[in-house]
Amino acid sequence: MKFSGSRRRFILAGATLGGGLLIGYGLFKPRDFLGDPQLLPLNADEVALSAWLKIAADGTITVAVPRVEMGQGVHTALPMLIAEELDADWTAIKVTQAPIAAVYGNIVGMVDTTPIDEANRGPVGVSMRWAYARLARVLSIQITGGSSSVRDAWLPMRTAGATARLMLLEAAALRWNVKVGELSAHASVITHTGSGRTFKFGELAGEAAKLTPPTQIDFKSSTQYTLLGKAIPRVDIPAKTNGAARFGVDTYRADMLFAAIKASPVFGGVLKSVDEEALRKAPGVVHVVKLDDAVAVIAETTWHAQQALNAAAIEFDGGAYAKRSLAGIFDDYARAMAVGDFFGYEDIGDARSALTKDPVIQAEYRAPLLAHACLEPMNCTVRVDVDGAEIWCGNQAPDLMRMNAAHALSFPQEKVTLHTPYLGGGFGHRPEPSTMLQAIKIAQAVPGRTVKLTWSRAEDLQHDTYRPPALARFKARLDASGNIAAWLHQITSPDGVPATMARWYPQLPLAGPDRTSVDGAAFLAYAIANRRVEHCAVAVDPLPIGVWRSVGHSTNLFFVESFMDELALAAARDPIDFRLRHLTARPRESALLERLREISKWDTALPSGRARGVAFGNAYGSIVGQVAEVSIVGGALRVHRVLCVLDCGRVINPDIVAAQLESGIIFGLTAALYGEVHYDQGRIKQNNFGDYRLLSMADTPEIITHLIDSDAEPGGVGEVGTPAVAPAVANAIAALTGSRLRSLPLRI
């Protein structure tokens, strides 16, 4: 693979941007991949060769990672991209969190939201992705999410590594007065082939940094890889096992105060009254802060602050939303469906006309409200002075957090220092600025003091930005051969991404279709001659909704793959065979399903009382299939085994991929079996893990993962294990009992 051009502009020949989008010269002007080396702070013996890496005299190579580490392994996988093309000694690699700068903006994450089929390579598809990529360049959001970290880094970080390698080779050639072609690099050592002379990278870094970056780069072929595809141990594991790792909740400063908060239990409610004098007299209390919808206590310890709040006489006024409920939301959905104000994301053939013929198969599915339930509760530490602020906060979008903090403080952004520690889980909750904005208001009450706000578990569950509930209705008809002749899929839910963006950019009017609402429902791999997928956006105010691990895929794949099994039953077909009949034009998908059939031993009999179910889908540039084995013992459902096959293109680190699949399956199985937020009388009823259950180790099934070898561009990994497990289990239950469960969580 080669591309040429100046440092400020490259011609990309065969390079890809997210899911195989081809980018050509003249169609797209990519960001300056290398960035400004001055972005990286340097010690006395270090030099930066780009915004992505610096090298010390002793050969230590520090890689700037633009995505945050929240358990998904980016502090290992992304440096591997640079180290491979640099030909670096992996043991010399260190990691630092990248600063806030436009060069680190996530392009692929934005392109993924384009409301068009990824397989569309025509003028419309290319133009729309180009427009979204241009918008992504303007916004340059440093967000971690959408299973986009490796996909977005695939080109710029390899570019940085390959460029640095060539600069080091050129520096050696100049020192020895030889041709670059006579030199080779391996494990951070440059060798002159003819003489055997060597230089270590650290000996040449200063001279290399003075050179002009090359205009032509040759990336390695996969056969030359020494790191990529290998199970390199994660760099964050030692610190996370010996207790040295620091998360946001671990932030500590010598002068620190601690805060707890109690917000209106009714969304949209306001603070009515509080006995401030009694609160101030409580042990350890330093200050009381009243907000429009909450009361915060600043104290000597978090325990003192929380105890004072627990004992306080506080009244809230729920206002017009005190009667709001989840049942009422689903009533709103049903009314909206009856009106039929849908936005069509996909319209192939004429599904409605094709469905005028009998027999028509119909079904309705529901998905509940869900919380993120990160094990590390929301927290933020803030120190506000007259001329600036310092903030420590686990987050998924540091640039957006700093922007919102600066706006709240009326400071220029350069006056706000934001630290991003490890995250104890994110799942789509930690791009949200709400906890930080609360912490800023609280810290402003005691200027010059550092204040750490920690939400209680109840606050965390009851004031989340939830995965929205969804309602889906299907109509389908089979032809004489038992294939799907017509398919109509109608979905009703709020638009989650615009809700999240409105909290980032409250001054901007945001409207338009939200692709994530139909992810997993529209643009399926299945060939259906007459297919329409449409969405009706219904507001659920004042309930705060946002994005949740795998976003629309988490609900829509349950709907789609459950209904596919219903159609397979109606056609008297084996569920895998039925799917394969609709994938004849999709060889990668077909190959994955065949592999899944093989490793799950699908065609062999199970012991009496057990059954299998299958689910399959495309997400984030990857293809995933799962088979679940279940039984019912003593009236209780037991999931014994989940087998997962993934085609994510080029595998960077197989151990990280397997761990993410296992994590996603456990996360999705928790939601499938137990996940349901109870919303009634304007408030969330649950307050801890005792009534918002997580999957225990004892109930976790055996999980077997299999990765398909591929030279395709990398696909996403962090979220793809989650969506398929619920329909796989539901389909297994139907096979076992003959009864179809169409609502989550799955209750037998």
Image (cartoon, grey):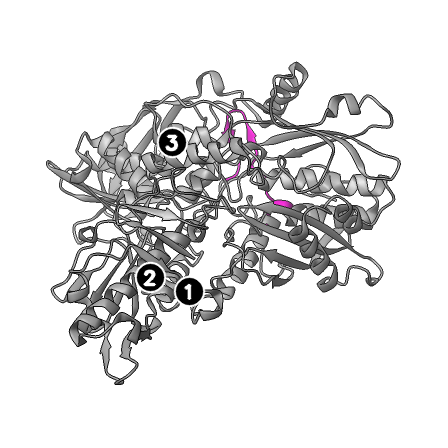
Q: Which mark is residue 162?
A: 2
Disc nearest the viewer among 1 and 3: 1
Can residue 246 be seen here? The reply is: no
Quadrant placement of the C terminus: top right
Q: Which mark is residue 263?
A: 3
Disc 1 and disc 2 in contact, CB within 8 angstroms: yes
Q: Earlier in the sequence, mark 2 or mark 3?
A: 2
Instruction: Give SS at disc 3.
Output: strand
Badge 2: how crowded within 10 Å, few (<14), some, or many (20+)?
Answer: many
Residue at the spot 14% in from the left edge and 37% down from the top edge: 447
Q: Earlier in the sequence, mark 1 or mark 2?
A: 2
- Which residues, given as a range, are shown in magenta? 670-686
Specify whether 735 is left or right of 668: right
Q: Amino acid at mark 3?
A: Ala
Position in image of residue 68 (x %, y %)? 36, 51
Residue at the spot 37% in from the left edge and 33% down from the top edge: 135
Disc nearest the viewer among 2 and 3: 2
Instruction: Give SS at disc 2.
Output: helix
Determine which quarter of the picture holds residue 415. Answer: top left
Q: Judge whether residue 28 is colored magenta.
A: no
Position in image of residue 256 (x %, y %)? 20, 48
Badge 1: how crowded within 10 Å, few (<14), some, or many (20+)?
Answer: some
Disc 1 and disc 3 in contact, CB within 8 angstroms: no
Specify whether 87 is left or right of 496: left
Residue at the spot 71% in from the left edge and 39% down from the top edge: 527
Q: Nearer the viewer, residue 195 or 650?
A: 195
Q: Amino acid at mark 1?
A: Lys
Q: Judge whether residue 681 is colored magenta.
A: yes
Quadrant placement of the N terminus: bottom left
Q: Nearer the viewer, residue 233 or 354?
A: 354
Q: Amino acid at mark 2?
A: Ala
Residue bearing mark 1: 220
